[in-house]
């Protein structure tokens, strides 16, 4: 019995460590930028706040995987407006894309035009807080979501660690 308590406590500690390791309280914007920028959770509150009451998360088969409530955050394009991208000319920005990476290695991609030259860019949010279904405990304080995507789960990235800006070769 004593051995079972020990094993249980070790497993519980490992689970807590894993959850904490997934949390994101800051991320960096790097790559084809003049200066790498580190953004923490507190600095996101300096941007204009946006919110959504609730939305449903669908997987790649359009099956309901859960719901998110009380989404609060800022627009990704508002944050990126403060970053100076290294580019020969504004025309070349059409060759740029962003890779958003989570602490667990999951990645999602956006093109520069998608963020700055389409209606999608007016919706993509960096989430500072949100509530999920109780059975779906999410790791990560900072997340990204594209509410206008049909398969919303595909680009629901939890635990944002970096946004890297690349140029197509």
Image (cartoon, rainbow, N blue to C red):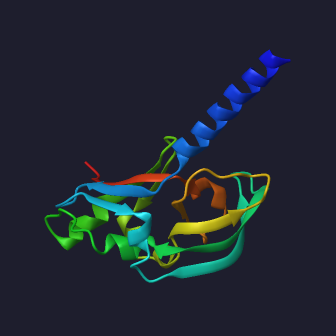
Vertically, is 154 above or below 112?
A: above
Question: Could you tell me which residue is drawn at 78 percent across and 16 percent down?
Answer: 3
Q: Which of 17 and 127 is in front in this view?
A: 17
Residue at figure coordinates x 36%, y 66% from the top left: 112
Q: In this view, does 10 lie above or below 151?
A: above
The N terminus lies in quadrant: top right
Residue in front for this viewpoint, 57 or 133: 133
Instruction: Tell me: residue 158, above or below residue 80.
Output: above
Residue at position x 63%, y 40% from top?
Answer: 16
Residue 114 location (% of width, % of height): 43, 69
Q: In this view, does 101 lie above or below 51?
A: above
Quarter of the image holding residue 71? bottom right
Q: Residue furthest front?
A: 2
Locate residue 108, reporting x and y percent.
Answer: 49, 52
Q: In this view, does 85 lie to the left or right of 154?
A: left
Looking at the picture, how far across and down is residue 155, in whole percent?
Answer: 56, 57
- Residue at the extreme bottom of the image, as rendered: 48
Q: Can residue 102 be seen in this view?
A: yes
Q: In which quarter of the image is residue 56?
A: bottom right
């Amino acid at each position: 019995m004593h051995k079972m308590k020990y094993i249980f406590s070790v497993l519980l500690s490992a689970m807590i460590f894993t959850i904490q390791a997934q949390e994101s309280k800051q991320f960096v914007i790097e790559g084809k930028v003049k200066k790498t920028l580190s953004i923490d959770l507190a600095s996101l509150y300096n941007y204009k706040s946006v919110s959504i009451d609730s939305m449903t998360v669908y997987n790649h088969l359009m099956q309901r995987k859960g719901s998110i409530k009380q989404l609060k955050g800022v627009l990704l394009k508002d944050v990126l407006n403060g970053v100076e991208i290294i580019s020969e000319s504004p025309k070349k920005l059409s060759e740029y894309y962003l890779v958003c990476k989570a602490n667990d290695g999951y990645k999602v991609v956006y093109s520069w035009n998608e963020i700055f030259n389409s209606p999608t860019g007016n919706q993509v949010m960096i989430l500072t807080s949100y509530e999920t279904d109780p059975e779906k405990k999410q790791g990560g304080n900072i997340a990204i979501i594209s509410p206008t995507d049909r398969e919303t789960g595909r680009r629901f990235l939890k635990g944002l660690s970096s946004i890297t800006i690349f140029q197509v070769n």
